[in-house]
């Protein structure tokens, strides 16, 4: 709640856009608290912050906990910030109880997870994991033409370090979805993140007057588009492995009450936890769209515009989180992340897992985003146990 | 083709908006030709023009042929103008052959059929038939605030007469649809005009993120809307009596690729030749929409915004047109008008029928609107025979 005062918005949310002066204040606050807790604080070339608590084995790779401090323009108090604060709370608890771990324990805050000011999203963790090129990313500009490099220097967070070994990575996060609340569950044991395939689709028929044109002589692009909406829903509700399918965008032309639509442009978003299943869903989509176009005597363009493979988290760490929840007597269930998180990039370089806690009505990226203190505390408890198990 | 020079557009069409100076030039041209043909030309209080050829029985109500000379802003050469010129050609033919009819024969040009500058459409014929109030209509304003009354006076076509008896009314018109061309037919024997019921529909679900929201927890307004599109098509393709159904307009909110749509606004246009069938289609629509909303757990608003009853033309005059086509050896078929015409209002005060001729690709309300001279001539021949039968 103290952190949420930095960039607080009138409606109870947060606006802490990455690498702005408000973001600097949030970073400085976190760094200050970390130093008070006796941690060694440093930042790397993309501005990721690491706050380390030494372990008994100086050569062991650190067990890292983290998330991000930046927010959407009209974001909430918990998205990202919770994961960083939960890490800090774990460290304070270790201090309070005088626990010394074998491996070092580190709290990380990744730069620009949101992608609201600079694209792409997951910038800091992507550079850290070697998925994104530091050199290229430093040249990215915001709408005012300011580069990432200039913005980093401007707030005093342009470091030299590029990456370091990670023994294990844990990210606690609000679910940003409705499942935990709907099932009255406190802890989501996250199995991984869904892969995504995004498509742009255009159906081209023939504009014609709704009065004089008999049904059998029409080439109605909206009928084809509507069939595809229902088929995307059929695909998403029949394939296994957390299948999801969404048509979120549709534009009808000429979009006039008494004219048969001659063109519809629409999007399709398919997601799945398994790449092979996602591929089968894609093949089904392509085949179905072609059949719809043929049957409706309309033209079809279908183009894939984004592919993001599924991410499976470390089976060992996932089991450790489940065991911790069980030992603490907390209700828990396996869940997948429908969206991407920094953990998805960290999973490429270290054993990784995530802990979800419920958020009110599943609402996120919104100033009314909310979560209950007892759920947030429960997430911290699970994180503590899982970190202790990993760090020894 | 001479008339089409008045208001000609670069792409081969016509812009002759009602009661403008260009419309006046078209009217004056028609009146001049009518006078050259020996007709008595007058206009009424709403600017309808009547050009009369006397009959042997001065007391008989005239047999009237007509349509309109105004056009859409980017209209074609034939829509409306053909029906007026066809009437003039019939009169010239009667003159050439020295035929004297029992009843007078009149060529009518109705004011503002299109409704492009002043609403409503079918203004002149509506006032003539007593469906629209002259007093109210004269006060209607265009976008510049000019009233119908001022515009009529401005072009010198504000008369005094309000209405007069009509023995029979014939309107020749291009089909403005694809049926005749598709079936290689020269003459459409028009049975009447479809009734229309127009609806505004809103489905209200819940916006949610396409990633974290499982299929079973969604309230997707676009899925409900897509089902309704297909059900409208089902209704239009299963009910008898020239049923038609169209969703021409759809607006999706928030219309973002990775957000489950929380709201869809759409229109439904149902048409049928029989009022009872149109009512059954409407009941089916309402019941189906409610079931879709319930199944999809989304809210529904469904509101009727336009009702225009079907119009059945005079069985005797329709048979006369069919007989004339047959006698002339022309291919012909029964057809309905999907759109409204001045004949629909005339049918309320006199026995009425229409003759359709093919237009290229069914395209109308467009500068590329086109029709073949031989088809237009065939329509004139049928009109001549039907008028002779009616006028004696």
Image: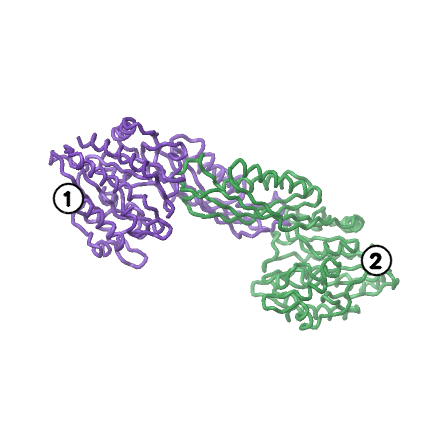
Chain colours: A green, B purple
Question: Residue B37 placed where, x, y %?
Answer: 17, 42
Would you say B31 lies left or right of B374 here?
left
Mark 1 lies on a secondary structure that is strand
Figure check: A174 above or below A30 = above
Tell me, yes or no, if residue A162 can be seen here: yes
Mark 2 lies on a secondary structure that is helix
Say which quarter of the image contains residue B67.
Answer: top left
Residue closest to the eye, B48 or A185: B48
Specify whether disc 2 shares its chain with disc 1: no
Residue closest to the eye, A315 or B179: B179
Q: Which mark is residue A303?
A: none
Number of numbered markers = 2
The C terminus of chain B lies in quadrant: top left
Give neighbour class at mark 2: few <14, some 14-19, many 20+ (Cα, 10 Å).
many
Question: Residue B111 placed where, x, y %?
Answer: 25, 47
Parent chain of label 1: B
Residue located at (78% from left, 56% from top) = A349
Question: Residue B62 placed where, x, y %?
Answer: 17, 37
Give the distance between the C-alpha atoms of the residues marked 2 and 1, in whole angstroms: 106 Å
User: Which dot, 2 or 1, sits closer to the camera?
Assistant: 1
Parent chain of label 2: A
Q: Which residue is mark 1?
A: B40
Would you say B327 lies left or right of A106 here?
left
Would you say B51 lies left or right of B343 here?
left
Tell me, yes or no, if residue A85 can be seen here: no
- Contact between labelled residues 1 and 2, with CB atoms less than 8 Å apart: no
Give neighbour class at mark 1: few <14, some 14-19, many 20+ (Cα, 10 Å).
some
Residue closest to the eye, B361 or A114: B361
Say which quarter of the image contains residue B281.
Answer: top left
Question: Residue B349 placed where, x, y %?
Answer: 22, 37
Residue closest to the eye, A321 or A50: A50
Q: Which residue is mark 2?
A: A391
């Amino acid at each position: 709640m103290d952190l949420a005062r930095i960039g607080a918005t009138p409606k109870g949310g947060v606006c802490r856009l990455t690498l702005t002066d408000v973001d600097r204040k949030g970073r400085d606050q976190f760094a200050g608290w970390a130093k008070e807790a006796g941690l060694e604080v440093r930042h790397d070339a993309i501005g990721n912050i690491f706050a380390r608590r030494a372990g008994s084995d100086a050569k062991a790779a650190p067990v890292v906990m983290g998330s991000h401090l930046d927010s959407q323009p009209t974001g909430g108090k918990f998205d990202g910030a919770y994961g960083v604060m939960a890490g800090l709370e774990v460290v304070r608890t270790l201090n309070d109880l005088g626990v010394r771990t074998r491996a070092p324990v580190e709290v990380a805050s990744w730069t620009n997870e949101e992608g609201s000011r600079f694209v792409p999203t997951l910038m800091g963790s992507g550079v850290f994991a070697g998925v994104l090129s530091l050199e290229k990313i430093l040249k990215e500009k915001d709408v005012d033409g300011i580069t990432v490099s200039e913005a980093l220097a401007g707030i005093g967070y342009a470091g030299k370090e590029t990456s370091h070994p990670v023994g294990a990575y844990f990210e606690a996060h609000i679910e940003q979805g409705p499942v935990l609340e709907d099932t009255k569950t406190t802890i989501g044991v996250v199995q991984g993140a869904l892969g995504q395939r995004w498509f742009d689709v255009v159906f081209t028929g023939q504009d014609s007057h709704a009065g004089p044109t008999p049904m059998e002589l029409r080439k109605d692009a909206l009928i084809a588009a509507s069939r595809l909406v229902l088929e995307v829903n059929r695909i998403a509700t029949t394939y296994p492995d957390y299948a999801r399918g969404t048509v979120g965008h549709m534009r009808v032309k000429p979009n006039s009450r008494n004219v048969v639509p001659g063109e519809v442009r629409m999007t399709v978003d398919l997601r799945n936890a398994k790449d092979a299943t996602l591929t089968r869903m894609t093949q089904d989509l392509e085949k179905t769209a072609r059949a719809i176009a043929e049957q409706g005597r309309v033209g079809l363009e279908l183009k894939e515009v984004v592919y993001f493979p599924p991410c499976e988290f470390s089976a060992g760490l996932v089991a450790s989180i489940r065991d911790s929840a069980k030992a603490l007597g907390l209700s828990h269930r396996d869940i997948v992340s429908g969206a991407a998180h920094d953990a998805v990039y960290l999973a490429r370089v270290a054993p990784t897992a995530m802990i979800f806690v419920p958020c009110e009505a599943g609402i996120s990226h919104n100033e009314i985003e909310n979560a209950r203190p007892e759920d947030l505390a429960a997430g911290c408890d699970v994180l503590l146990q899982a970190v202790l198990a990993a760090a020894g």
